[in-house]
Amino acid sequence: MHPFELIRAIDVTEAIQGAAESSTAQQEAQVRFVGGGTTLIDLMKLNVERPQKVIDINGLPLDKVEVLPDGSLKIGAVVRNSDLAHHAAVARDYPVLSQALLSGASAQLRNMATTGGNLLQRTRCVYFRDTTMPCNKREPGTACSAIGGFNRTLAILGTSEQCIATNPSDMSVALTALEANIHIQGAKGERSVPIDEFFLLPGDTPHRETVLEPGELITFVTLPPPSVGNKSIYLKLRDRASYEFALASAAVVANVQQDRITRVRIALGGVGAKPWRSLEAETSLDGKTASEEHFRAAAEAALRDARPQSQNGFKVELAKRCLVRALKLATRTA
Amino acid sequence: MSRENRKSKVCKGNTEPEETPSFGRLSRRTFLSRLGATGAAAAASPLLGLAQTQVKQEQAQTPVKVAGVIPITLRVNGQEHQVQIDPRATLLDCLRETLHLTGTKKGCDHGQCGACTVHINGRRINSCLTFAAMHQADEITTIEGIGQPANLHPVQAAFVKHDGYQCGYCTSGQIMSAVALLNEPCGPADADVQELMSGNICRCGAYRNILAAIREVRQQAKQGVTNASI
């Protein structure tokens, strides 16, 4: 591990100033914030991350979950995944989020990992994690070793010729279906970004994964007030029953009135270069009856642009079936 | 608790705060407590004076000053330890190599096996994925703080009774997880326990016996036979 200076921040503004000297907030950042450390320290051990300065943000006053007067939910950036999953308001009003969080990692890691850190967790692509191999995400311009290489677990949606890495988060998939807003504070002030715009597709710049600029810190995540009649579910399919990343997952937030789908939000995990919102699937279900035929059509629409690689063709059908099953569970009236 | 401590150390009021910060003590000017630095970064630190002061105070215990190390205080199993470590030291390495508490094991060193599980303020974590210097305000508990040979924790006794190990390498992590699990939201079924124990890998495959041990302690706790929490 490369040497670094460890700094404990107690004030958001000053933490931001401390990080603003970094030339980037993306790959090769010279300054990193550390929350739970479960991604960052792992990657520092592998020399994939080599910050010269690490700012410990665990002392910042961003550790609360609050229901705001308008009914929306405000989640602090350093709220632990386990605390968020078991928070009464989350378990009651946003079960998709609880389920997604509890399906991720292990109990130990969930006790460490933070909301902001989970949003920023990095791909598990083996080439990204191996500094002896070319990787455009880690070292722009080198090559994508995964194309034609070991790509069984990698993405089939939103990929490019430069990168086919999967976003590994479960939480972010649920937050995408819940239309979360990411609140960011930086040297130039505060801004709020819809989660679907927070993540960038790889394109020709796979080393740029989010809209974060140097010094910018995720401070909060907000969720819109829960709609009456909403049902939500997170369904995750993987190689083993627990403690494994998704091969395919689906987050569905649905409202069914008199057997008609009046509103549905759909996001897929394990298959996308970013948490994958499917507007196509949502549109195809608008006003339709909750039937297997319509669910299958929605799944076809969601995966229409899928581009499988040499080893992950199975994910196309797996993701379709995952979504159909999740839609069935979310619209079940009994 | 840690935040309260830090808050209390932030200088407030109209008068200019004293510019004599120490680790964990903060003024408006030095809002960040510089826990550690190496090489030139350390030399440039405005807190270097303080580091030297602390080292001086601790000369009796730490006569040799090594470049790139920082003094920290850790509270482990109820006992305070003042040590000098490299800022890169994980909590796991600090426990094992510096404090010689070798009951906590290093398996994968990447948060994938659970052998390094310890408790921070009563909650289980992977000590391999956190820096020791980040835990100066925390209560750290290792397997050495759970029970003693003559006075086993109920979970330890159950592991012995049900043969919940073979080679033993994962056992301290399994026990730390199982002890923490007793205070976590966990459903009544074996499947619930298996799910919450999935972060601890046993290469020997003693899972059935580990499950039996935990099942028995949970039943005892439910019946009030034992106070199976720490």
Image: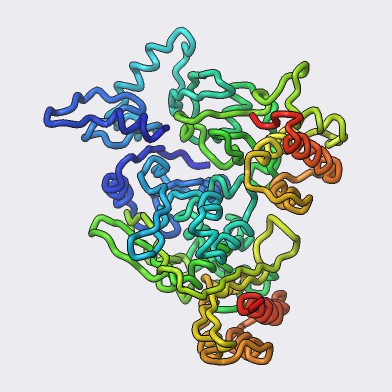
- Residue A93 as seen in the image, left or right of residue B48: right
Instruction: Evaluate whether residue B223 shows in this view.
Output: yes
Q: Residue B182 at what x, y percent from top left?
A: 68, 39
Nearer to us in this view, A86 or B77: A86
Q: Residue B218 at what x, y percent from top left?
A: 75, 39
Nearer to us in this view, B12 or A57: B12
Above or below, comparing residue B126 to residue B80 in the picture? below
Instruction: Please name the residue shown 47% across and 14% down the image.
Output: B64
Nearer to us in this view, A285 or A245: A285
Q: Residue A52 at what x, y percent from top left?
A: 41, 44
Query: Quarter-wise, where is residue B67 in the image?
Result: top left
Above or below, comparing residue A161 to residue B164 in the picture? below
Q: Residue B229 at what x, y percent from top left?
A: 66, 32
Instruction: Please name the residue shown 46% across and 65% down the image.
Output: A207
Query: Quarter-wise, where is residue A153 in the image?
Result: bottom right
Nearer to us in this view, A282 or B65: A282
- Residue A165 as seen in the image, left or right of residue A76: right
Instruction: Evaluate whether residue A164 shows in this view.
Output: no
Query: Quarter-wise, where is residue B154 in the image?
Result: top right
